[in-house]
Amino acid sequence: MTNTLLFTNSKRSRSDDTGSGDAKKLASAIHRHDPASALASARHEFGEHGGVNMSIEASATFTVMEPETMRRMFTGELGPDGDYFIYSRHFNPTVLNLSRLMAALEGTEAAYCTASGMSAISAVLLQLCSNGGHIVASRALYGGTHALLRHFLPRACNITTSFVDVDDLKMVEEAIVEGKTKVLYFESVSNPTLMVANIPELSRLAHQKGVTVVVDNTFAPMVLSPVRLGADVVVHSISKFISGGADIIAGAVCGPASLVNSMMDLHQGTLMLLGPTMNPKVAFELSERIPHLGLRMKEHCHRALVFATRLKNLGFKVIYPGLEDHPHNELLKSIYNKEYGFGGLLCIDMETEERANWLMHHLQNHGQFGFMAVSLGYYETLMSCSGSSTSSEMDPEEKALAGISPGLVRMSVGYIGTLEQKWSQLEKALIRLQEHGLSNKN
Ligand SMILES: *Cc1c(COP(=O)(O)O)cnc(C)c1O
């Protein structure tokens, strides 16, 4: 036991060195400018033996030296801020370390990581809304989120959602029922249509009516900082760009400390009681990837812009927020963290599913350009026909309202190989498409 105490003490003084009050104040000032500098200023946790990387706290439970300490931990008097941990479905040190990085990335007071993006979304909505509560949400949402709001929450707990076009501020305003509406929910960049939300205006409008703004920033980590733009809470599917490896399912809720703590409450907390817990080994793995997230995003964005520009010049129908003909190009330029770019996804509208499938088949099986797969943020390019895959939960009318054409091919542009090598593979497939008389270009 003496050894345990020694280790604990040495770890405490080390983290105290790096997480002192002044350093924290400085970090929060820097948050406002750039996610990369905020990440570099976040507390760095060393390994128990002085390793440059933290140790993995692979423990479900934690010892105390005195029974009194246990009592004080359960009353909330001693907590993770002071390095007191109870049980890993509650706070775990390694998961907390990744969560601090997520808070730095998004410029929020606190964050906590979860087993998936969907669990982060459902936990935060269930924490903010009670039985009978109301949500106003964008029509253009990830299919799983749409199903949660449209089908699951009304049945399971009578939480209902009005779906709106978030581009239409009047429609948003009219959908908010003062006193009843708890949350305005939308994606910073929508899946799969790549519409950019006017985060400052939507937040201002919601706050006038006492509504909490929750933004899914999965498509634009580093590129957009929704809380800095006025939102209250950011949710992420870490499974995508932040992981970058297409090997892990994970999520996070980033927001005020009061919200994160309420989600951990022993009597009322959705994270504590529903238990979508992240494994500390996974948290360690992910925290080693966050330092190069900015570099990866820059390359994803750079290549997406080059491909989108060239595709457009060839006469194809391209949706990319970095192109001047995109309805939100000006908006994005006014709110983004410009050193990263316009996002790593683009869409080509092939109009029919047949043409979309022909193109994806050739790009994967003849051109080695990328893989037919859902998800995004991988080093290889991933392609899917959204209408028949990730948005298939929507009925045809809902798809039409969300702007999802049956031939829409969503591409998460990878950074493997050289840009010109990848472009020539893409160009060759497009030339073949024309030779087969399948091109729909103008
Ligand atoms: C993938 C995704 C989710 C769900 O995340 P999981 O980690 O798969 O649970 C939520 N929102 C968006 C925008 C996504 O792309």
Image (spheres, rainbow, N blue to C red):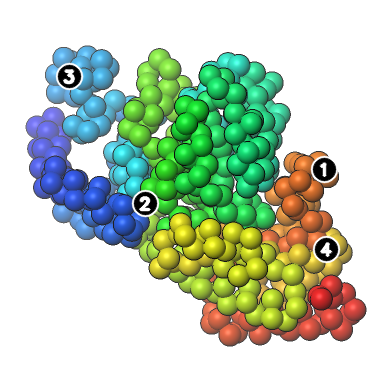
Taking the spot 81% from the left edge, 76% from the top edge, the residue there is: 442
Instruction: Establish if 396 lies above or below 65.
Output: below
Q: Quadrant of the N terminus?
A: top left
Residue that carries the numbered disc 1 in the rendered image: 397
Q: Nearer the viewer, residue 53 or 317?
A: 317
Q: Nearer the viewer, residue 90 or 392?
A: 392
Disc 4 to disc 3, how far (Cα)? 64 Å
Left or right: residue 267 versus residue 399 is left
Residue that carries the numbered disc 2 in the rendered image: 105
Taking the spot 31% from the left edge, 57% from the top edge, the residue there is: 33
Q: Nearer the viewer, residue 255 or 433?
A: 255
- Amino acid type of the residue that numbered disc 4 sits on in the rendered structure: Glu
Taking the spot 61% from the left edge, 80% from the top edge, the residue there is: 422
Under 8 Å from ligand 1: the CB of mark 4? no
Going from N to C along the chain, the mark reached first, 1 or 2, is: 2
Disc 1 to disc 2, how far (Cα)? 37 Å
Under 8 Å from ligand 1: the CB of mark 1? no
- Amino acid type of the residue that numbered disc 2 sits on in the rendered structure: Leu
Left or right: residue 326 versus residue 405 is left
Residue that carries the numbered disc 4 in the rendered image: 351
Left or right: residue 144 versus residue 68 is right
Going from N to C along the chain, the mark reached first, 2 or 3, is: 3
